[in-house]
Image: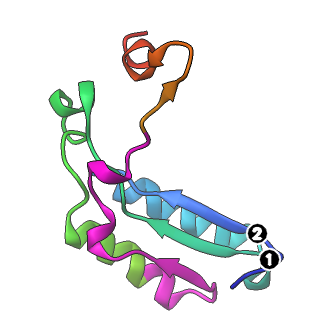
């Protein structure tokens, strides 16, 4: 368990692998391995309007995630990866307010 320090949590998005690799490469070129840990988050779950906007209408593919994991393994950074079962609506926050009920539609309809 980490008690002090920094974790850079990167939520990977479907179809955006090149962006992920650019971000990781940027971090590697500007920071030292001991500065922080990298967490490659794969739990993007499409919902609401994203369902009709490719590539955001789907979860990450195994290949997309494995490319980033391979980069992390070949880097000098320490980090965390997630199991495939970390994806699903059960991990999406309810986004509710006791005053207004569900606020998710209000936020997404803007």
The residue depicted at 16 percent of the width and 28 percent of the height is 52
Q: From the viewer's perspective, is residue 90 above or below residue 95? A: below
Asked if disc 1 and disc 2 are in contact, CB closer than 8 Å, the reply is yes
The residue depicted at 27 percent of the width and 66 percent of the height is 64
Q: Which residue is mark 1?
A: 35
The residue depicted at 38 percent of the width and 58 percent of the height is 18
Q: CA distance from mark 1 to mark 2?
A: 7 Å
Quadrant showing the N terminus = bottom right
The residue depicted at 44 percent of the width and 42 percent of the height is 93
Q: Identify the element where label 1 is drawn.
A: helix
Quadrant showing the C terminus = top left
Q: Residue furthest front?
A: 98
Residue 109 forms part of the magenta stretch:
no
- Residue 54 shows up from this direction: yes
Q: Where does the image place residue 44, in percent across and percent down from the top left? A: 35, 51
Q: Residues within 10 Å of mark 1 (few under 14, many from 20)?
A: few
Colouring style: rainbow
**Chain part drawn in magenta:** 71-93
Q: Where does the image place residue 46, in percent across and percent down from the top left? A: 26, 41
Label 1 vs 2, first from the N-terminus = 2
Q: How many marks?
A: 2
In-front residue for pair 73/86: 86
Residue 90 forms part of the magenta stretch:
yes
In-front residue for pair 15/100: 100
Q: Which residue is mark 2?
A: 6
The quadrant where residue 63 appears: bottom left
Q: Residues within 10 Å of mark 2 (few under 14, many from 20)?
A: few
The quadrant where residue 6 appears: bottom right
Q: From the viewer's perspective, is residue 87 above or below residue 77? A: above
Q: Where does the image place residue 15, in percent across and percent down from the top left? A: 27, 51
């Amino acid at each position: 368990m980490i008690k002090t320090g920094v974790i850079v949590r990167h939520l990977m998005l479907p179809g955006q692998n090149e962006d992920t690799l650019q971000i990781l490469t940027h971090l590697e070129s500007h920071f030292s391995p001991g500065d922080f840990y990298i967490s490659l988050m794969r739990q993007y779950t499409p919902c609401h309007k994203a369902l009709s906007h490719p590539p955001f209408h789907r979860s990450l593919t195994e290949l997309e995630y494995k490319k980033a994991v391979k980069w992390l393994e070949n880097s000098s950074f320490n980090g965390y990866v997630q199991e495939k079962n970390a994806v699903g609506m059960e991990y999406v926050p309810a986004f509710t307010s006791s005053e207004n009920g569900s606020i998710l539609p209000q936020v997404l309809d803007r």
